[in-house]
Image: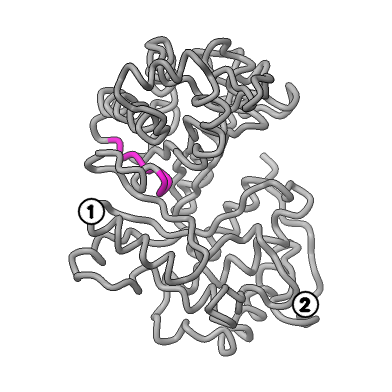
Amino acid sequence: MLLRNLDLMAQNKFNVFHWHMVDSESFPYDSTTFPNLAAKGAYTPKHIYRQADVKRVVDFARLRGIRVVVEFDTPGHTGAWGLGQPGLLSDCFTSSGSPTLPNLIDPTKNETYTFLAALFQEVLNVFPDNYIHLGGDEVGGTAIDCWLNNPRILKFMKDNGFGNDTTLLENYYFKRLLPIIQNIGSHKKPIVWQEVLDNKVVAPGVIAHVWKGDTYDDMLTEMEAVTKAGHYAIMSSCWYLNYIKYGNDWGYVDYPLKINRGMYYECDPTGFKGTDEQKQRVLGGEAIMFGEYVDATNLIPRLWPRASAVGERLWSDPAQTVSPDVAWPRLHEFRCRMMRRGYPVEPPNLPTYCPSPFEADYEFDE
């Protein structure tokens, strides 16, 4: 499925595959340094990416002009990590003291950073790209159970002058993690989700990945803030393709206070108020497809041709790609081309039919 999707990415001019490989639910990466991470953290022994699989994906992508940037999201979203690395995660408790499932790395232990150094030493060798995504999102809610309600960690916070402010402990974590990455490969450029920088982590050279915002104005405000702080930035807020609604949702999304604003086409990562120098720091945009309700059975039809609209918006002349009304005939024609190659991509707008029949015979047999 990954290879088929990479082929579609190449057809649609996407040049980076951001591989969110591990998360709370599963650790499928087969580490040779820490084999128990996948042996105990993957869904099943069949749901594992061995290093030969990774190499195949990286090589397949490279031949199609696509770079593979892997993400190992920490310190949150790490529940599956703890199954294969005892002691890595914080013990978590409700406000009444009842234990809950751990899902957050314990940043107070020196052993944590010894483990991370060894793991990323391997990961940065397996994935050759100059960029590495370190995550950093959605720590806040989990931090109450796993840090504030943990007496040992709360004592560490108070002893270090953090009080009850979990963002300061998160800052402490990243201030120790980022030098580890730089020591392994000084040419590696770390990317983090926007919360890390919103929480005032001092991290020169870190790239901001903007993904939040209740309104379009909120999204642009965040882009303005991170670029003003001197960071390069990537924008994804407009293009969360795992969210669907009735109709041609690639054309319009009803934001609060921004009713019927054209979403995929009218969104501009450089549309914020700021200097030319700030806008030069915008590296581009990224279409997102998280897998809470997506697997191999529905990935391609949900992603395409909705992602085609994102690719066209980011690569083509803005003057010709701001109107979803003008775009849908182009998407219909391109959908037919993808179908002729055997891909079950959904209609862009109402039932429309291609002149050639669907031919599902395009495979990647070796």
x, y percent for residue 176 = 31, 24
Label 1 to label 2, Cα distance in Å?
A: 52 Å
Scheme by which the image is coloured: one colour
Question: Which label sits in the foreground, 1 or 2?
Answer: 1
Residue type at numbered disc 1: Ala
Q: Is residue 90 above or below residue 251?
A: above
Badge 1 marks a residue whose secondary structure is loop
Q: Is residue 340 visible?
A: no
* x then y, percent, for residue 358: 80, 69
Circle 2 is placed at which residue position?
A: 356
Circle 1: is it few (<14), some (14-19), or many (20+) Cα within 10 Å?
Answer: few
Q: Position of residue 119 (x, y in %)?
A: 44, 19
Q: In the depicted view, which residue is nearer to us: 94 or 192? A: 94
Of the 4 image quadrants, the one containing the C terminus is top right
Q: Report if the CB atoms under discs 1 and 2 are less than 8 Å apart.
A: no
> For this rendering, which residue is in front, 117 or 107?
107
Q: Is residue 233 left or right of residue 358?
A: left
Q: Position of residue 336 (x, y in %)?
A: 70, 75
* Residue 130 among magenta residues: no
- Residue 202 in the image: above or below residue 362: above
Mark seen at residue 229: 1
- Residue shown at the point (56%, 55%) measured from the top left: 288
Please, what is the dominant secondary structure of the magenta stretch? strand
Category of crowding for the residue at label 2, using alpha-carbon neighbours closer than 10 angstroms: few (below 14), some (14–19), many (at least 20): few
Q: Nearer the viewer, residue 7 or 298?
A: 298
Name the residue rendered at 62%, 47% in the picture: 3
Point 59% across, 31% down: residue: 53
Residue interval drawn in magenta: 188-195
Residue drawn 50% across the image and 37% down it: 139
Q: Earlier in the sequence, mark 1 or mark 2?
A: 1
